[in-house]
Image (cartoon, rainbow, N blue to C red):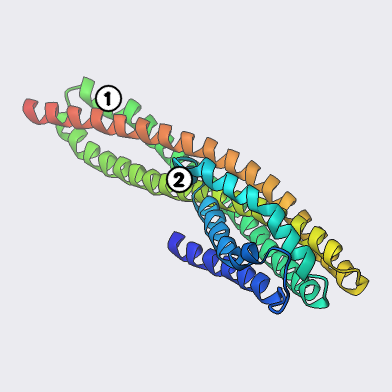
Amino acid sequence: MYSQDRKYFRFRCRVILVAFLLISPATSSPPKQDGASSLPRFILQCAEIVSALIKDPNGFLKMSDKATIVQGCIKRVPEILEVIEHTAKGPILGAGLLVVSGYLLYESSQLYERAKDLEENYEKCKDDFKLVEDNYTIFNDYIKKDIERHWKNNNTAKMVRNLKTVMEKLTSFFNSLSELADDTRKDIKQISREKTQCFAYFLSAIITCSSVTIVTGNLLVIIPTWGFGVFTLFYNVYSFLNLDKTLEKFQILKKAVMKKRAEINKARASLEVVMMRADINM
């Protein structure tokens, strides 16, 4: 599922990049011809860097030459702005930015829906954990009140028969919690990716709205672009806050699941020892 998400994300990045390249007038002559000739290649490099940063922020931060990469991007920003200012005074770029703004709004709305789905996933995981926890409490009481009583009364034959059933249930509880731990771990990773995308869409919306204001004076383009942008900002701020809360809940739930799983595993190991001693006495 994660590889499919990465494929879709790379596709979205390419769509935005292609839109930017297509809407830039090809017949213009910017002031710095040498810089402009290398600009498309530089934009592609920056797109790859941003894509890598969004997909794996920790991996990017571990790169030894990350400072050089970032400094190189920053140094070229004034040149990019100069080229855009010189070449992008026509309606084509304004229309392209409007399309990009609408695209960002669509992607942000999809991210908002995924954030709600993750919140529902948490509620389901919490209910599943509560069910296992309640069932384990019942069997734990049975172990203390019945199994231990047979052990003290030296009724090992009946105790062993009961122990086998209890061991099967404990193993079932342990496996259920292991699956639940894997699910929470996957959701936590997905939330981290979605939060990064929230920031990327938020920043892209600001850049798009600012750019359309600079490059065109057509209100028929500026107003809808800003309208899309405002909704995009709202979606991403709201989604980010919800994702942050959901992430905190998932982290607490994960700790509880791991703690309960360790408790069940310890109880299971103790009962295995009891079974071995009972077999010796029999």
- Kindly identify which numbered label has been placed on residue 184: none
Position of residue 15 relative to residue 114, above or below, is: below
At x 64%, y 68%, the residue is: 16
Q: Are marks 1 and 2 in contact (CB under 8 Å)?
A: no
For badge 1, the amino acid type reads Glu
Question: What's the CA distance linking mark 1 and mark 2?
Answer: 52 Å
Residue 69 location, x and y as percent? 53, 47
The N terminus sits in image quarter: bottom left
Q: Is 69 in front, or is 232?
A: 69
Position of residue 29 relative to residue 82, above or below, is: below
- Kindly identify which numbered label has been placed on residue 148: 1
The C terminus sits in image quarter: top left
The furthest residue to the bottom: 27
At x 75%, y 64%, the residue is: 84
Q: Which residue is mark 2?
A: 59
Position of residue 52 relative to residue 95, above or below, is: above
At x 65%, y 61%, the residue is: 113
Q: Is residue 30 visible?
A: yes
Crowd tier of the residue under label 2, counting other residues whose Cα lies within 10 Å: few below 14, some 14–19, many 20 or above: few
For badge 2, the amino acid type reads Gly
Q: Nearer the viewer, mark 1 or mark 2?
A: 2
Residue 240 location, x and y as percent? 68, 48
Q: Is residue 198 visible?
A: no
Identify the secondary structure beneath mark 1: helix
Residue 6 location, x and y as percent? 49, 62
Q: Is 244 in front, or is 85?
A: 85
At x 44%, y 40%, the residue is: 64
Residue 21 location, x and y as percent? 65, 72
